């Protein structure tokens, strides 16, 4: 069962990576009228996406589920249970990331 889960996770990650392009993206905040960057309301780095995913109640694992999905800003994330925690893949057009998160308690 673990082998099937691992292979499914790898296949999902490969499909997201190949289907959505590379992970390189430069985000330049739009300056406000005073010329100061306004920042972004959405996570832009892999660390910010992971932190947003981990803290989002909507991304919590449903009881008994081995796979689930949620949205984090402009990203759509899919998670699957593995023996090392949760394998999470998040993607939006032109960018995708993947990470392993420890199981929430």
Image (spheres, rainbow, N blue to C red):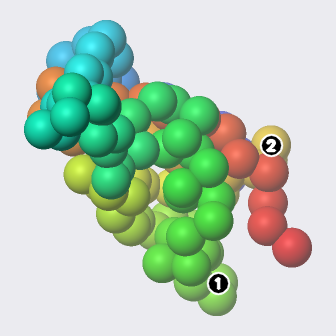
- Considering only vertical position in the picture, is 39 above or below 63? above
> Is 54 on the left-hand or right-hand side of 73?
right
Residue at the bottom extreme of this rendering: 63
Q: In which image quadrant can residue 32 be found?
A: top left
Residue at image point 80% right, 51% down: 102
Q: Residue at x 13, y 38 (%)?
A: 33
Q: Can the viewer see residue 43?
A: yes
The numbered mark, 2 or 1, whose residue comes first in the sequence reads 1
The residue lying furthest to the right in this view is 105
Q: Nearer the viewer, residue 15 or 4?
A: 15
> Circle 1 sits in a helix, a strand or a loop, which is it?
loop
**SS at mark 2?**
loop
Tell me the residue that label 1 is attached to. Answer: 64
Mark 2 burial class by Cα count in 10 Å: few <14, some 14-19, many 20+: few
In this rendering, position of residue 60 left or right of residue 43? right
The image shows residue 24, relative to residue 37, as above or below, that is above
Where residue 84 is drawn, which disc sits there? 2
Whether residues under marks 2 and 1 lie with C-beta atoms below 8 angstroms apart, the answer is no
Give the distance between the C-alpha atoms of the residues marked 2 and 1, in whole angstroms: 17 Å
Q: Nearer the viewer, residue 36 or 85?
A: 36
Q: Quadrant of the C terminus?
A: bottom right
Whether residue 16 appears in this view of the structure is: no
């Amino acid at each position: 069962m673990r082998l099937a889960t691992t292979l499914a996770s790898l296949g999902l990650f490969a499909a997201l990576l190949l289907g959505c392009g590379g992970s390189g993206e430069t985000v330049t905040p739009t300056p406000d009228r005073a010329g100061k960057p306004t920042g972004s309301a959405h996570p832009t780095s892999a660390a910010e996406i992971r932190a947003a995913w981990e803290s989002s109640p909507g991304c919590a694992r449903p009881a008994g589920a081995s796979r689930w999905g949620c949205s984090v800003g402009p990203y759509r994330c899919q998670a699957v249970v593995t023996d090392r925690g949760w394998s999470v893949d998040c993607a939006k057009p032109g960018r995708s990331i993947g990470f392993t998160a420890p199981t929430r308690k």
